[in-house]
Image (spheres, grey):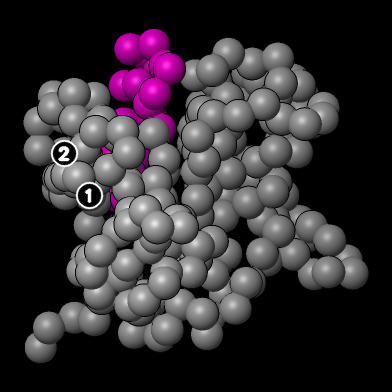
Amino acid sequence: MIAEPILSLSGVSVAFGSRPVLDGLDLSLGAGERIALVGPNGAGKSTLLRVMAGSLTPGSGSVRLSGAALESVGRKGLARSIAVVPELSQLPFAMTVEEVVALGRLPYEDPLLGARPADRAVVAAAIDRVGLGRLVGRDARELSLGERQLVLLAVAVAQAAPIVILDEPTVHLDIRHQIDVMELLTDLNTRDGRTIVTVGEERAWASRGGMFRGCPFRR
């Protein structure tokens, strides 16, 4: 019996005005896979991620999460199923590392009672797993690019979603932090069974040694 894909796209097309970006795209991801969408800038990789994450509705085609239409899942269900790690950006206001990581627990918090002891324990465990204990109490805006990327990954760890989607997770990072990020993603996949989807330019992923199934994009 063939297992139901955890995430699938069928005939997905997206256009911005008169410019087509995705045209009849089909993609199927099995639970526990890790794939890299590689290709030049402007090939539509980030647009595809937005469609997969539910933040962009395609002009045509369908997206299904474990067999259910993505639009039927609801915001909370989507947040519990898909963790999105964005490109590095500046935080708009002061937040400590642990406050940022705690954002990953919002889909599970009681709207009236807020974070529970169990949520705080998950946040602490995520910080420990990513190796950020030394940064607890620090303003996340003051961290290096590599440290901030690890904080964003800790948010995804705390979110505990079975699918993690990342847009250019190693761009602008020095080699040490690139290795840290890649090792963490591999660990989340092999130890936790999470499905990992990431994008990047071909030259950035050419040396990954088969760690990720490559899905090349061309325009």
Q: Residues within 10 Å of mark 1 (few under 14, many from 20)?
A: some
Is residue 30 in view from this perspective?
no
What amino acid is labelled 1 in the image? Ile
The residue positioned 39% from the left and 34% from the top of the image is 168
- Residue 88 image-quadrant placement: top right
Asked if residue 27 is among those painted magenta in the image, a careful observer would answer no
Which quadrant holds residue 195?
A: bottom left
Q: Position of residue 104 (x, y in %)?
A: 63, 51
- Tag 2 residue: 211
The answer for how far apart the CA atoms under marks 1 and 2 are is 8 Å
As drawn, the residue found furthest toward the bottom would be 1
Q: Amino acid at mark 2?
A: Met
Q: Is residue 170 above or below residue 36?
A: above
Q: Quadrant of the N terminus?
A: bottom left
Q: Is residue 150 above or below residue 2?
A: above
- Asked which secondary structure carries label 1, the reply is strand
The residue nearer to you, when weighing 74 against 101, is 74
Side of 214 where 137 appears, left or right: right
Q: Which mark is residue 26?
A: none
Quarter holding residue 187: top left
The magenta stretch is 169-198
Residue occupying the point 25% across, 74% down: 11
> Which residue lies most toward the right here?
112
The numbered mark at residue 35 is: 1
